[in-house]
Amino acid sequence: MEAPYDDRLLHQRVVGGDEAALGEVYDRLSSLIFGLSLRVTRDRVIAEDITQEVFLVFWERPLTYDPDRGTLRAWLATIAHRRAVDHVRAEERRRVTSLGPRLFEPSPPRLEDTVLAADEARRVKQAVTALPDALREAIELAYYGGRTYRQVGEELGVPEGTVKSRIRLALRRLADALAEEEV
Amino acid sequence: MEPVERLYLDALMEDPAVPGHSLRPQLLAGARARRRPAAPTAPWAEPFAGRVAAMDALLASAVDDDWSRVIVEGWTLQELVAHLAAKDGLLAASVGAPVLGPPLGATSAVGRTSDVQAYERARSPEQTRRDWRAQADALCRHLAGLSPDTPATLDGMSAAVRDHVLARCLETWVHTDDAARTARVRLPHPVPEHIHPTADLCARLLPWTMLLSGLDGSGRTVLLTLTGDGGGEWHVPLGGEGSGVLELDAWREGDGWRRADARITADVVSFCFLLGGRGDPSSFAADLSGDLSLARDVLSSAPALSGP
């Protein structure tokens, strides 16, 4: 999925050293990135640090983002997720080590572009299967079928607005289901 | 990204939240400390300041091997950066801005380049990067107080300082692209507002590049259409010294301005790069019409002003 024109323009401005463009990116995406970091770490202070760091990485190394390979939102989310997971793992390790001898070795570092390990990807897919049919169909068409919301609506015979709310509801349920399993 | 990963991240972002206090001021202060923004300068010099910031972003991720790799002209990245500093310094000298680096001796581009390269070879690549950036930023800051029409001379060429700065912008852009290609990094284009004045300079240079190539274009005109963000349409009399070149806009619609001996339509960025000495004129992608041999002469002479 290629990035929209707005992402490209903001990227061009940030590469050209335009601070105001960083402010605009922050205003547009910070609540999503903070929400994601908070969801994974469950710690507001840590989530704030991660959010700040993610936008700083974009400013400091803007050429590591390639708009041909995806949206800015997905790229920032990937970095935030990686940092949040690293934090959670470091915390777990710290807890385990303080309890006594190491029970397991820390997992090897992830490949740059991989968000999910194989077993996690499987959990997401299982959670999709468990969704009510109406929600599952919308998700499958939009994400796995690469359809736009309008196309999903045409295929399911419902208005675009309904598709939008079904997908939002489905994403929310998925997030809850995945969080429950982690506990 | 895999669909399942996109789905997962979207699910995690379905609960947007706002930090207890805004991180914005902190973020911008932190950003300034980590990477210097484009230097403040006159609006007409901003395209140059932007290319300097982009080159610096590229250099920020260069490692030891990158610095010693040959980029163009047999120069390593460090020598290339020293070359940019040399020419920025010559322009600085011409308009009374601070000249950094070794004391000013040779005032030709070739002579000053070899002086600055010799000086920088004894320093670390990171120092060379800082020296180049300091010179470019000092020039930008000085330009903030200058009229764009201030006369300036660089390497024997006299022109308004604005045009010299746009030529510095194009050269910095072309060399950043050279270095990015070597490093296999995708360099995004400048913003359209920065491409446009650079393209305008390139259009105004065409009478000169014809002249330098020994081609007589007096009395002939070309209509140049540059497509893509930052492009436009220019009416180019080939005989003059570039002063007759006019950008056509809505006001000049149907005024007979579009009558020309030849028409050239090409992508705006490729055209700027052709003037900057990148790309082969004989295989340059352009739509030509009217007097084809005139149009081909214009294209084949286009790189005439591009030096190292």
Image: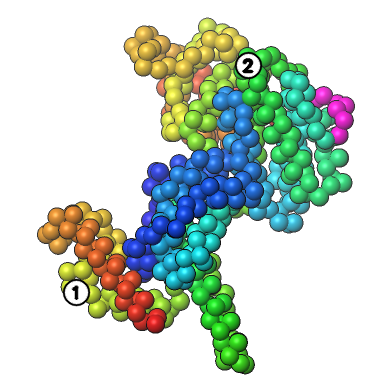
The label on residue B285 is none
Dot 2: element: loop
Can you say whether B190 is above or below B31 in the image? above
Residue at the image position 41 percent from the left and 11 percent from the top: B257
Q: Nearer the viewer, residue A174 or A49?
A: A49
Residue A161 lies, in percent from the top left, at: 18, 54
Does the rendering let one see residue A21? yes
Magenta segment boundaries in residue numbering: B102-109
Residue B17 lies, in percent from the top left, at: 38, 60
Q: Nearer the viewer, residue B222 or B83?
A: B83
Tell me which corner region of the image, top left, top right, bottom left or bottom right, holds residue A104. Answer: bottom right
Q: Nearer the viewer, residue B307 or B251?
A: B251
Can you say whether B98 is above or below A49 in the image? above
The label on residue B147 is 2
Tell me which corner region of the image, top left, top right, bottom left or bottom right, holds residue A96. Answer: bottom right
A92 left or right, relative to A69: right
The label on residue A132 is 1
Dot 1: element: loop
Residue B108 lies in the magenta stretch: yes
